[in-house]
Amino acid sequence: MLSSSIDWRARLALLCAMAIWGSSFIALKIAVDAMHPMQVIFLRMLIGSMVFIAILPLWKRGFNYQKGDWKWLLAMALFEPCLYFIFESLALKYTTAGQAGMIASILPLMVAIGAWLFLKERISKYQWSGFIIAVIGVIWMSWGSDVTSHAPNPLLGNSLEMMAMVCAVGYTLVVKRLSDRYSPLFLTALQTLIGTFFFLPLALSSPIPDSIELEVFIYIIYLGVFSTLGAYGLYNYALSKAHASKVAGYTNLIPVFALLFAYVFLNEVLNLQQGIAILVVFAGIMLSQYSHRGRKVLTDIPPGTVQ
């Protein structure tokens, strides 16, 4: 029986998972600054696929195919990782890892809006208000960003990250439809394998850099192994110990870790306008949670399943 509270082991697992997902923005930022984004994503997908092949007996069980499911499974993989990573990897060429992580924090609100539009799920006035406030904060953060070597065009980069979030909404709604027949581990493995084949021709057609530092490959391995499988396993361990609604609240820590790691590893510093705008985004997120009870739009699906 699940506990209504979260014990210390589940809390520790969640903190580690959120830290890994937050750090994935920094690792991806470093990698795409050194290699073409499509090559980075292909290598990441390839490494993730190798891990899943190694644990094949664990995920091949969660399979209950029904006629016509191939369309939904293909749509899932198209949304994420295919389109999602195209937008996100390009976004990190133009904006900072911290800002991208901050934009990703409004994903639960965007999913709630998507569920209202396509699944006819109810959405409260607090969620509407929180969504509007958070989007205003994102726009303010983008307009108030300084052009730096880390963010040569923050408005474009943040817009691309928003498009990545739109893809993540589509992915989440499709997975919600499939989750009754397929295990989360199977769906993650499938989209990783499809992503490998999708990004292969894009990687081969991209210019190959003259040299790549070992550090860059280490970050790519980190993305392929820890962000895909490690954080996923920790998150699902917590889901097995406590109610999903309790566990999902920890996803708000992802942008906090992203901003912290961006400051420590990339020396990213926020200006005053950005700082205020980020507080506005957080205010919108907190407002949206005010009366958020009993909903299962995103809570069963690990955020950034292929982060």
Image: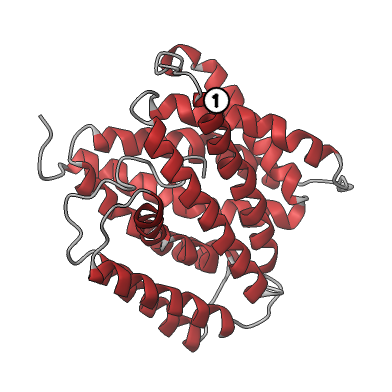
Give the residue pinned by disc 1: 70
Please determine whether, in this image, residue 188 is positioned above or below residue 134: above
One can see residue 270 in this view: no
- 80 vs 203, left or right, is left
- 286 vs 198, left or right, is left
- 251 vs 41, left or right, is left
Residue at horizontal 39%, vertical 35%? 177
Please identify the quarter of the rendering in which residue 277 is found. bottom left
- In front of the other: 39 or 201: 201
Q: Position of residue 297 (x, y in %)?
A: 31, 48
The quarter of the rendered structure image containing the N terminus is top left
Residue at horizontal 48%, vertical 65%? 103
Residue at horizontal 46%, vertical 54%? 22
Query: For the residue carrying disc 1, how many other residues have a C-alpha within 10 Å: few (<14), some (14-19), or many (20+)?
Result: few
Q: Which residue lies furthest to the bottom in this view?
A: 272
Residue at horizontal 41%, vertical 60%? 110
**Callout 1 secondary element:** helix
Please determine whether, in this image, residue 143 is positioned above or below residue 185: below
